[in-house]
Image (cartoon, rainbow, N blue to C red):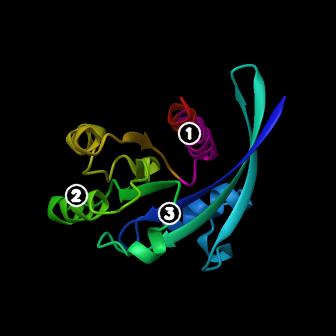
């Protein structure tokens, strides 16, 4: 049995966190952000789930601020907060975003992507630093690098399953 789902994911983070590179890795299988065009980009993937294969079509959009824009985020199935592990975590900015999301009518699930783990010797933000945020926002943390395709693939497949499970919960 094959089911088809379309999900819109908004990648939100400050400039330089690697949002374009993540989208490029997913859509074009390259980390060269120069191939990413602004606007909405799509990618179809197949994910095994409970003995069947689910066909997902993801629509990706990139937002360069944690201040949020209700019009841009409207209709998002999920939000991926992107952080650069080589930069300090700006807690006040993250808290402002969390407050913004709590004020939205539709509250999409939030996922945390800690990007650039391939630069571990330059890292100053670690998974332990993100765990309090994860608990506050009820968000999964993914330690990824757009240069390491398996980390991106695993993240997007896990997000697909979590979105599917959330949709199934709403039905019951």
Toward the front, the furthest residue is 172
Is residue 27 a member of the stretch shown in magenta?
A: no
Label 1 element class: helix
Disc number placed over residue 75 in the picture, else none: none
Q: How far is disc 2 from disc 1 in space, using C-alphas?
A: 31 Å
- The residue under label 1 is 167
Q: Is residue 138 left or right of residue 9?
A: left
Q: CA distance from mark 2 to mark 3?
A: 20 Å
Q: Nearer the viewer, mark 1 or mark 3?
A: 1
Q: Who comes first in sequence, dot 2 or dot 3?
A: 3
Instruction: Please identify the quarter of the rendering in which residue 130 is found.
Output: top left
Horizontal side of residue 168 vs 98, given as left or right: right
**Residue in the picture at 34% in, 48% down:** 121
Q: Residue at x 53, y 64 (%)?
A: 75
Q: CA distance from mark 1 to mark 3?
A: 18 Å
**Residue reaching furthest bottom?**
38
Nearer mark to the viewer, of 2 and 3: 3
Which residue lies at the image location 59% right of the left edge and 45% below the top edge? Answer: 156
Q: Within the image, what quadrant is residue 40 found in?
A: bottom right
Can you identify the residue that label 3 sits on? 10
Residue 143, quarter of picture: top left
- 48 vs 63: above or below: above
Q: Is residue 151 magenta?
A: yes
Direction top: furthest residue: 51
- Dot 2 corresponds to which residue? 89
1 or 3: tag closer to the N-terminus: 3
Query: Are circles 2 and 1 on residues that touch, CB within 8 Å?
Result: no
């Amino acid at each position: 049995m094959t089911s088809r789902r379309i999900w819109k994911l908004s990648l939100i983070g400050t400039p330089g966190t690697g949002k374009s590179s993540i989208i490029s890795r997913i859509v074009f299988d390259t980390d060269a952000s120069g191939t990413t065009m602004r606007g909405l980009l799509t990618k179809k993937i197949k994910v095994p789930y409970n003995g069947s294969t689910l066909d997902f079509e993801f629509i990706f959009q990139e937002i360069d601020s944690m201040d949020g824009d209700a019009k841009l985020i409207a209709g998002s199935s999920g939000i991926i907060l992107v952080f650069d592990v080589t930069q300090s975590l700006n807690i006040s900015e993250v808290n402002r975003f969390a407050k913004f999301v709590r004020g939205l009518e539709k509250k999409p699930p939030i996922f945390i992507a800690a990007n650039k783990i391939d630069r571990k010797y330059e890292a100053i933000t670690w998974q332990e630093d993100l765990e309090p945020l994860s608990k506050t926002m009820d968000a999964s943390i993914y330690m990824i690098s757009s240069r390491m395709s398996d980390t991106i693939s695993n993240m997007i497949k896990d997000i697909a399953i979590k979105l599917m499970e959330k949709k199934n919960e709403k039905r019951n």
